[in-house]
Structure formats: structure tokens, C-alpha cells
Amino acid sequence: MTTKHHPHETGARLIRGATGDWEIVLGLEVHAQVSSKAKLFSGASTEFGAEPNAQVSFVDAAFPGMLPVINEYCVEQAVRTGIGLKAAINLRSVFDRKNYFYPDLPSGYQISQYKSPIVGEGAVTIDLPDGSTRTVGIERLHLEQDAGKSIHDMHPRYSYVDLNRSGVALMEIVTRPDMRSSEEAAAFIRKLRAILRYLGTCDGNMEEGSMRADVNVSVRRPGAALGTRCEIKNVNSIRFVQQAIEYEARRQVDLIEDGGKVEQETRLFDTKTGTTRTMRSKEEAHDYRYFPDPDLLPLELDAAYVEAIRESLPELPDEKKERFVAEYGLSAYDAGVLAAERETAAFFESVASGRDAKLAANWVTGDFFAALNKAGLDITASPVSAGQLGALIDLISDGTISGRIAKEVFEILFTSGGDPRAIVEERGLRQVTDTGAIEAAVEAIISANPDKVAEYREKPKLMGWFVGQVMKETGGKANPQAVNEILKRKLDG
Ligand code: ADP
Ligand code: MG
């Protein structure tokens, strides 16, 4: 594995402009919904898909006199996430009111954390397509409430408000402006999502809105000071994040090269046109009149509480990847792919247990993943269990079937289930290792093709053709090694 910590100095992906090259600078603010049954300051349910306004407590609707009560479970999830992001946990944090008016915010303020967030600086290692890795700095993680939802497309003249989301706990995870391409931003979101899922603190489901990103984009001449950024709000898929970055960076380059100036502003990404457009000029922190929420005490954690959470953390994707390389001798690439999801890693380890791990990794990342993809299935819904795949691999290892026949058996397993050994017996797929039978097939092919035999003397590459013929003759069941040996002996001898 090649680990490049500063690929930017050695050649980031640049944008070619009319007046020279430009570098993209990116920072993300990811909102991750805490996997909690209840909201951050009320006992109302957070379940997705309920009837509008069916999950709203008096606190969430901001009825006068209602008081918020912190949900300890959400605090624990924020601490877990902070530790998973290799970040400093602040034993004292403060909830502030962020004041603004919006119809889906009945209190007129959002409870958030401003100057004293629960989690400080951390780092996430991202895996790039070329196999290299790099580190993205985490600036902070703070806890805050989500707002409700305004619905503008149900009535020609009225807008509706759904407060089910009002008060749901969010972790806002803010990165340093450390990313330099849309691919790096995508890799960051993928890795962050994997970590959150391993920790169980957020389901990472972007379609349901449990994870969404504000994307900060600026451009500069390579090595120059940071340029003015635009923030693209609420982008809800990795593909859209990449599209938004590509469009926005190009827009800024064209604007500057035409003699214009990038205005710091908040923009929207239009998923239909793949473009961004102005939403509002960028608000500053002072516009929100932040002040500590008088209804809530500062949040104080003791060190032992944090340590107990640290102790309970599962093995995370990077550590698992490293272990897969060390313990099973996998390539960094395969190890990364297998460690990306907890379920995939567990499946692989179950298949590999007591078997040739590389063969297991090849089968899981090869035919198995391909079949799942083709069927549009998640690994948790796989029709082939780890036990069945393991049993199939055993048949290859003990010489009962060839790798080629195994692919056939796998297809049968995937579509109709069953026991691999029974399938092989029933369908007579057992590998022919009986050298007499193979020898007979070889002789038949040789005597039927004297021209090819003559050609072979000039072109030894023709061996492949002979192997193919013998395999055909034996219905693909001949042991390939035996075929090769016998052919060589007969043709060369
Ligand atoms: P705000 O909360 O007002 O959006 P922050 O200072 O917290 O402002 O920064 C928000 C995000 O913007 C962070 O992810 C940060 O990395 C990113 N960022 C800051 N400066 C730039 C820049 N010049 N180009 C791109 N991203 C930037
Ligand atoms: Mg922001």
C-alpha cells in the first residue's frame, strides 16, 4: 500500500481555466441524525415515516412554559462518535440558543452548541480510489436540534408545517477545509458514514435524510491563500455532493477569470439541472444572537463516564482493515472493501474462518458482490449465507470441483439455495480426477486435430486452445491441473 499524506503537494486534481490552473478547497458540515428513539430534549418518537405532526410533544411545538430535558442517550452517542473520530471530548459543553424566524421553528430559536461544543478536534482517514489514504481534520462536533419541515407542494396557495422532525437530535460534524476534489469529499462522506454505522450512532441513511451535508467550496491558485467560499446547503446524496462541487468550482473559476468576485453566500443545489443558485447572502454568527440557553445547565461529564464509553467502542473500519491485511494477508484494497461495512466484514470473517482467507476474499468481493449488485440486494438480504459460501469454497479446496464449476454451483445456490455438496452430487458436477478418463479425452482431441498439433509446434500458445477443447469434452469437470499435465506430456513427448 502506498500512503501519501500530502498528495496535494505532489499533484492534486486541478481545474484548468483560461488563465491557468485552479485548486478546489472543500470543507464539509455534515448533519448526522442520532439513532435515538426519542428526541434531544423531549420524549417524542423519532421514527421515520409517521403521519405529519403525529410525533410532537409540547416541547417540540414550543408551547409556553415547556422546559427541555436533555436525553442522556443522545449525549452518549455524541461522545461515542467523538471518540470514533479520534477527537477530544470536552467534559464541559454549553447549549446556546441560535435565534432565527422560520415557520417550521415554532420557538424562534434552535438549541445548538456554539462556543463550547461537546467534541473538539479530531481526524478521519479517507481512502482514495488509487489506494492511497489521507487525513481530513475534524474541527468539532456539536449537538443540536433539528427543525420541522415546511411543505410547499401540497396546496396551490398554502404551505404546511410538519413538526415531527422538530427537536430530533443532530450531530453537526464540521471538517477543516482539507479536501481538494469532489472524489475526496465523496471518500470522506463514505468513511464518516462507515464509522457512524460501526458505532451505531447514526444509520447514515441519506435517502431518509438521516445524513446530509453542507458543502463549502472555494477555489484558489495552487499554494495561494484561501479564496472566498460559498456554502451549498443540505445536499443529500454522495453523487449530488460531487455534482454540486464540480459545478460550483467551475462557476467560481469562470466568474473570477471574467473579472468578477466570488461573494460569500449560501447556495442551493438543484438536483434536476445539476447547478447551484443563490439562496441568501451568508449570515454571520452575530446575526443569530447566540446566547446560553437559560433553560439548560452546562453539560458536565466526568472523565470516568467518557472512559467507560471509550472502552465499549467496537473495532472501527480503519483498524479492521489493518487487521485484515495483517491477519489474512489481504491487499489493502480488498481489506478496505471488506471492512467498509460491519455486515460485510462479519460475513467475510465467517466465510474465511478456518479456510484460505484470500480465496474467501476473492469469492466475497468477486462473484458474491457481483450477484448481490445484479439482484439489487443488500448483504443482509443475501440468499447465500456465509455458511453456504464457505461450504462451496471447501469443495474447491478439497478438489471436489474446479473453480469454474464452482461458479456454476454458486449461480444455483444464489437462485435456488441448497447445500453445495448435494448440488454437486445431484448434478454430477464432481471434478474428473480420474487420469484415465482425462487421458482418453486428450487423445481424442489430439487425433481429431492433427493440423492444430502441427501448429502447436510453432506456437506453444495454442496449449490454451487444447485445454479448452478437453474441458468442453469433459463438460468442464476435468481437473484443470491434470488436463494441463497430460496435454503437455502428450503434445511435447
Ligand atoms: P460557518 O459555521 O459560518 O459555516 P465555519 O468557519 O464553521 O463557518 O466553516 C464552515 C465550513 O467551511 C468548515 O467545514 C470549513 O472547513 C469550511 N471552510 C472555511 N473556509 C473555507 C474556504 N475558504 N474554502 C472552503 N471551505 C472553507
Ligand atoms: Mg455553517
Image (cartoon, rainbow, N blue to C red):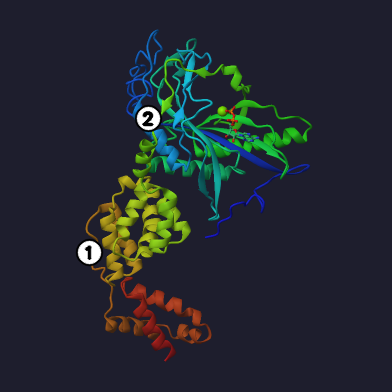
Please indicate, yes or no, whether residue 153 appears anywhere in the rendered image. no
Residue nearest the observer in this picture, 196 or 51: 196
Q: Is mark 1 within 8 Å of ligand 1?
A: no
Q: Secondary structure at mark 1?
A: helix
Q: x, y percentage for residue 218?
A: 66, 35
Q: Is mark 2 within 8 Å of ligand 2?
A: no
Residue nearest the observer in this picture, 102 or 83: 83
The relative height of residue 311 versus residue 434 in the rendered view (above or below) is above
Q: Give the labeled residue for mark 2.
A: 74
Mark 2 vs mark 1: which is more N-terminal?
2
Q: Secondary structure at mark 2?
A: helix
Identify the image quadrant of the C terminus.
bottom left
If the picture is divided into quarters, which one holds ligand 1?
Answer: top right
Instruction: Residue 421: give its label.
Output: 1
Mark 2 to mark 1: distance in Å?
A: 49 Å
* Residue depicted at 52% across the width and 47% down the height: 126
The relative height of residue 487 versus residue 103 in the rendered view (above or below) is below
